[in-house]
């Protein structure tokens, strides 16, 4: 039996999204190709070995800052009445340890932040496959299952197809991977996950897999007794660093061109003008033993033999003076660089101090104000992800035999420590500092470094400062 329309629709959707995923990964990893205005510029940079430098990659920062604040600290199992369900909680914690869910969920959020999509698979574990890596074993029996596999999959291999009528309703999921990578004869496997069954397909060796005829159904459908898809899809409208793509390309060019001028700052290009009354001095720069062809008049590439290498001297007709060419000023590159970094910060709602190469970090209330856009974004991401992660955890418990259990996701704070500390914590911190000051004053009196009266005056001024009743006096610093 050939592949179905559902299979080909899912594969078409998967292939269409793959280019965007690859682009998102390239910008996160800093592997984007440089864009040169002319072929000559490319050749000049290649000659100086500056065409393959690893980029100064700022585009990964918006992703990393979001991921660093989206920390899941635990999952809590509750009864329908809202009371703790100790038995379900014990099984949930056992599954957490078995699948190292702290790392798994972190990687899931990393996938969503980088690619815009992340997929979590939940399926009963087969003890015979415990030592094997890969996708969940969908052939494992679902009766008497004592353990559950919780795995993330690359979005370039998985997709969920949603209803056109109801975009929030998932119809089915499709997964495709290469099971035999023999070049020219590749064989792919595909799975179509429904709420009641799982269909398995295999492609003909060497086929593209674009048409239904390229696929053959394998065996009978597998039973899915749980009444829902075992694939949980987390997504955002676009990758966290999507709006950083263009600024990063411009930054790459600025940095590359700046590096191309660095040598010229130390080794100036020089020139000399020969007096017309003297014999002509023909030829190019000083003879270079490593590049003898550079001074060969028969070489078609040397129509003009004036090299733009650092330290070269240009022989020109009419030797009546000498001088040197000035390299481009660093500010010509650094000023635009800072501008495009600010653009990237504004476009991605990432505070500028996370990009700032000067290290100017705000503190206190200024930090809270500066971090507000990022904190709002983190809160938004929590709202988007919470329901799907809770649904996945509830599905884990259903597989383990716990019905009607509600799971609550416990998140870490959205803001920085300065932002999230309560007023009580701040007051306690202030009180501890005051107590430390009083102890130091008492030690100073005992050591006769200051008189008791001086200590009392200092304490009085200190208490005025704490209570807000300090009088401003000339020459006295609080």
Image (spheres, rainbow, N blue to C red):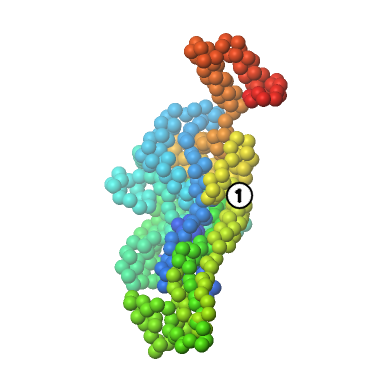
Crowd band around label 1 with a 10 angstrom C-alpha radius: few (<14), some (14–19), many (20+): many
Residue that appears at 52% across and 27% down: 83
Which one is in front, 216 or 329?
329
Which one is in front, 127 or 21?
21
How many numbered marks have been drawn onto this rendered protein structure? 1
User: Residue 258, image x and y in percent?
Assistant: 51, 63
Q: Is residue 158 above or below residue 5?
A: above
Q: Is residue 399 above or below residue 332?
A: above
Q: Quadrant of the C terminus?
A: top right
What secondary structure is marked by label 1?
loop
For label 1, the residue is: 349
Which one is in front, 267 or 347?
267
Residue that appears at 57% across and 20% down: 434
Left/right of residue 424 with respect to residue 28 in the rendered view? right
Q: Is residue 342 above or below residue 44?
A: above
Whether residue 39 can be seen here: no
User: Residue 11, image x and y in percent?
Assistant: 47, 63
Residue that appears at 51% across and 83% down: 275
Q: Residue furthest front?
A: 277
């Amino acid at each position: 039996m050939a592949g179905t329309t559902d299979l080909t629709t899912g594969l078409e959707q998967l292939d269409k999204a793959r280019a965007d995923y690859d682009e998102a990964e390239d910008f996160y990893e800093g592997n984007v190709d440089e864009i040169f205005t002319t072929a000559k510029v490319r050749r000049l940079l290649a000659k100086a070995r500056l065409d393959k430098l690893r980029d100064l990659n700022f585009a990964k920062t918006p992703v990393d800052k979001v991921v660093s604040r989206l920390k899941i600290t635990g999952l809590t199992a509750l009864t329908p009445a809202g009371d703790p369900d100790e038995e379900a909680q014990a099984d949930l914690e056992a599954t957490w340890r078995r699948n190292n869910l702290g790392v798994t969920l972190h990687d899931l959020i990393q996938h969503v932040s980088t690619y815009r999509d992340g997929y979590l698979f939940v399926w009963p574990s087969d003890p015979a496959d415990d030592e094997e890596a890969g996708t969940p074993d969908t052939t494992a029996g679902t009766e008497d299952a004592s353990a559950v596999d919780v795995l993330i999959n690359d979005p370039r291999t998985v997709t969920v197809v949603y209803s056109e009528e109801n975009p929030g309703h998932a119809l089915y999921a499709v997964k495709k991977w290469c099971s035999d990578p023999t070049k020219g004869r590749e064989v792919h496997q595909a799975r179509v996950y429904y709420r009641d069954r799982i269909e398995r397909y295999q492609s003909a060796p060497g086929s593209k897999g674009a048409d239904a005829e390229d696929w053959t159904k394998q065996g009978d459908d597998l039973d899915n007794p749980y009444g829902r898809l075992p694939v949980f899809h987390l997504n955002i409208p676009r990758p966290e660093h999507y709006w950083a793509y263009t600024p990063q390309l411009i930054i790459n060019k600025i940095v590359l061109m700046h590096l191309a001028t660095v040598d010229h700052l130390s080794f100036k290009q020089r020139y000399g003008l020969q007096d017309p009354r003297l014999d002509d001095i023909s030829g190019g720069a000083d003879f270079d033993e490593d590049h003898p062809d550079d001074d060969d008049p028969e070489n078609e590439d040397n129509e003009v033999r004036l090299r733009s290498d650092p330290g070269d001297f240009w022989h020109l007709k009419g030797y009546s003076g000498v001088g040197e060419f000035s390299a481009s000023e660093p500010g010509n590159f650094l000023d635009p660089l800072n501008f495009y970094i600010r653009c990237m910060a504004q476009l991605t709602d990432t505070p500028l101090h996370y990009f700032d190469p000067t290290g100017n970090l705000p503190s206190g209330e200024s930090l809270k104000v500066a971090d507000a856009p990022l904190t709002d974004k983190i809160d938004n991401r929590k709202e988007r992800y919470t329901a799907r992660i809770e649904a996945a955890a509830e599905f884990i418990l259903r597989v383990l035999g716990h019905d009607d259990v509600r799971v609550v996701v416990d998140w870490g704070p959205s803001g920085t420590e300065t932002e999230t500390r309560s007023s009580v914590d701040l007051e306690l911190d202030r009180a501890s500092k005051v107590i430390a000051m009083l102890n130091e004053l008492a030690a100073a009196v005992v050591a006769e470094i200051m008189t008791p009266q001086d200590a009392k005056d200092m304490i009085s001024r200190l208490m005025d400062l704490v209570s807000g009743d300090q009088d401003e006096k000339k020459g006295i610093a609080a």
